[in-house]
Amino acid sequence: MMSIDRIERLASLFMAALGVLFSLYILYVVVDQGQERSVYTAAYSKTKGCPSGYTYDKLSDICQRIEITRSGALWLEFALIGGCSIFLAFFAFRQRRTGVVFFSIFMGLVLGIGSIGVPYFALGIWLLWRAWRLQRYGDATFAGSSRRAREEAMAKKEGKILPAPAIATPGPTAVETAGPRPSPEASKRFTPKKKTGKRR
C-alpha cells in the first residue's frame, strides 16, 4: 500500500493528538476521582413506563440510568487509547498508510463507532478510499480521479485504450538528487613523482 501524502499525514497527526488529549483526560479522571459516573436519560412513557435498566425520577419526570466505571477499566482504556495514539502518530510521521489505517480503525472500534470513535473510523475508511483512487486513477484527489474517469469513459466509447495511470511516488531525498560524490582530486603537493624508466 502506498505512503500517505501531506494532507493525509496532517489529518492523521491531528487525530493522534486528539487521542493523546483524550487519554490524558482519562488519566485525570482516574487520579482525581478513581471512577467515572455516566448518567443516561430517556423519555418516560405513561403506558410503557421506563425502558429496561432505567429508573423513573419524579422531580425531572424522566427515566435515568447511572453507570459507574471503576478505575481498573479506566486504566485499560487509558492504555489502549494512549498506545494507539502514539502508534498512529509514529506511522503518520513515517508516512506508512497501512499502520495509520489499522490503528485508526482500531481506535474507532475501541472508542465506539456510535460515539467519539466515529472520526477515527472515518479516517481509516477515507485513507483506504484515497488509496483505491490512487491505484485506480493515479490521483487520490476528487478532481483528478474524476477527470481520469471521464477520460476513460470517452476512450471506451471511441474504442481507444488509455495508458495505465502513473502513480505519484514520494520525491527523492537530497542525497539521492545530489548523486554520488565525486572522488577527491590528488594533492599536487604531496603526490610522489612518477618514476621514469632510464637506462644506466
Image (cartoon, grey):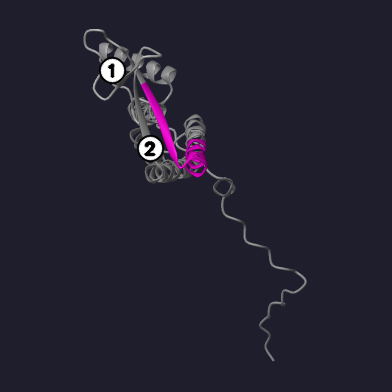
Residue 117, percent across and down? 38, 30
Q: Answer above or below: position of 198 versus 123.
A: below
Q: Residue at x 43, y 35 (%)?
A: 36
Could you tell me the amino acid type at mark 2? Thr
Mark 2 Cα within 10 Å, few/some/many (few <14, many 20+)? few
Quadrant the N terminus occupies: top left
Q: Quadrant of residue 91?
A: top left
Residue 69, percent across and down? 38, 37
Could you tell me the amino acid type at mark 1? Lys
> Which portion, as a residue range, is magenta?
20-40
Whether tag 1 and tag 2 are in contact, CB under 8 A, the answer is no
- SS class, disc 2: strand
Residue 160 numbered mark, or none: 1
Residue that lies at the very extreme toward the bottom in this rendered image: 200
Residue 86, percent across and down? 47, 44
Residue that lies at the very extreme toward the right in this rendered image: 189
Residue 69 numbered mark, or none: 2
Residue that lies at the very extreme toward the front in this rendered image: 58
Tag count = 2
